[in-house]
Image (tube, helix red, strand yellow):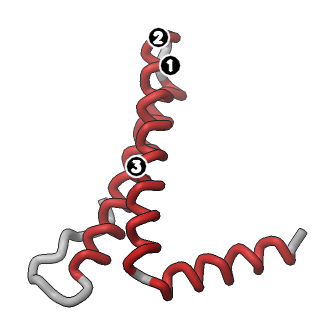
Amino acid sequence: MMGKIPQEITDDADLQILRTGIIAEFDAINLYEQMAAKAKNEKVKKVLLDIAREEKAHVGEFQTLLFELDPEQVKEFEDGKKEVEEME
């Protein structure tokens, strides 16, 4: 995992925790999808992909909280979205 859990309590500890949670969920999604791609048993593959989908929901939960607590994150997200849409 590339993120680190904050060791000291700071004003932005909750934001750091949420971002670390998002990183952990993306790591889990990648792991489960990679394992599913290698699984020989279809039931194993199906379960791994189902778990990966659940992790994606967790990303949404963390991101929702992050957006509630960090208005700048919302603004930058929207700016990034516009940049991508302009590329189409």
Q: Mark 3 highlights which residue?
A: 58
Residue 86 on image: x %, y %: 86, 77
CB within 8 Å, label 1 to label 2: yes
Do labels 2 and 3 touch, CB within 8 Å?
Answer: no
In the image, farthest residue toward the front: 68
- Relative to 2, 13 lies left or right: left
84 or 45: nearer the eye? 84
Return the residue nearer the eye: 54 or 87: 54
- SS at badge 1: helix
Q: CA distance from mark 1 to mark 2?
A: 5 Å
Q: Position of residue 45 (x, y in %)?
A: 49, 20
Q: Residue at x 42, y 74 (%)?
A: 68
Q: Quadrant of the N terminus?
A: bottom left
Q: Amino acid at mark 3?
A: His
Name the disc covering residue 43, or none: 2
Instruction: Tell whether 85 sits left or right of 16.
Output: right
Q: Earlier in the sequence, mark 1 or mark 3?
A: 1
Give the Cα distance between marks 1 and 3.
Answer: 19 Å
Q: Amino acid at mark 1?
A: Lys
> Which circle, 1 or 3, is nearer the viewer?
3
Q: Position of residue 6 (x, y in %)?
A: 17, 76
Judge whether 50 appears above or below 7 on screen: above
Residue position for label 1: 46
Q: Quarter-wise, where is residue 78 in the image?
A: bottom right
- State the image coordinates of residue 55 (x, y, percent, origin top left): 41, 43
Tell me how far mark 2 sits from mark 3, CA to CA. 23 Å
Counting residues from the N terminus, which is met first, the one under dot 2 or under dot 3? 2
